[in-house]
Image: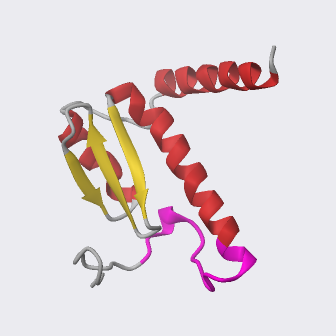
Amino acid sequence: MCAFCGALVQERHWADGPERRDPEAEEAASWRQRRQAQVALVNRILCQYGLEVRDWNGHLFVLSNRTGQSEVVPHLATLWSTAERLGQCRCDPLDPALLARVEREGALGAESRRGT
């Protein structure tokens, strides 16, 4: 159990990526970067549904909707069913139209960062 939040600490899920071994090592920094990249990508998808996810200290995720309702999500594998319930819509992160839209937006964002 987490001493800070009182949540039950669950085993790591395969969807969360490689396990952190030593928090002080350089490896931990790259693990945090991968986790931040995961959150950024998931948010690019979730914004299409009016939802947002935040990392909570590298152990959990907090999913929120536009009205401020939030739920703690233990790992990315359960995120989508929680998103459907909280967003009151069907969330399909592999929908081809959604992926194409996210890809286009990513390409547009990359162009603006390059200054073109």
**Residue at the spot 65% in from the left edge and 74% down from the top edge:** 28
Looking at the image, how many numbered discs can be counted on the residues? Answer: 0
Q: Nearer the viewer, residue 23 or 41?
A: 23
State whether residue 23 is above or below residue 43.
below
Colour pattern: secondary structure
Residue for point 23% across, 53% down: 71
Look at the magenta stretch and give its main secondary structure.
Answer: loop
Residue 9 lies left or right of residue 40; in this view the side is left
* Residue 24: % across, % down: 66, 83
Q: Position of residue 56 (x, y in %)?
A: 40, 62
Q: What is the magenta range?
A: 12-28
Left of 46 or right of it: where is 73?
left
Locate the C terminus and report the quarter of the image it occupies.
Answer: top right
Q: Would residue 91 be counted in the magenta stretch?
A: no
Measured along the vertical axis of the image, is residue 12 above or below residue 79? Answer: below
The x and y percentages for residue 85 are 18, 42
Quarter of the figure with the N terminus: bottom left
Q: Which sits in the foreground, 84 or 96?
A: 84
In percent of width and height, residue 91 lies at 32, 35
**Residue drawn 63% across and 58% down?**
34
Indicate whether 101 appears above or below 42.
Answer: above
**In the rendered view, does 47 fall on the left or right side of 87?**
right
Q: Is residue 16 magenta?
A: yes
Farthest top residue?
116
Q: Is residue 43 above or below residue 111?
A: below
Q: Quadrant of residue 106?
A: top right
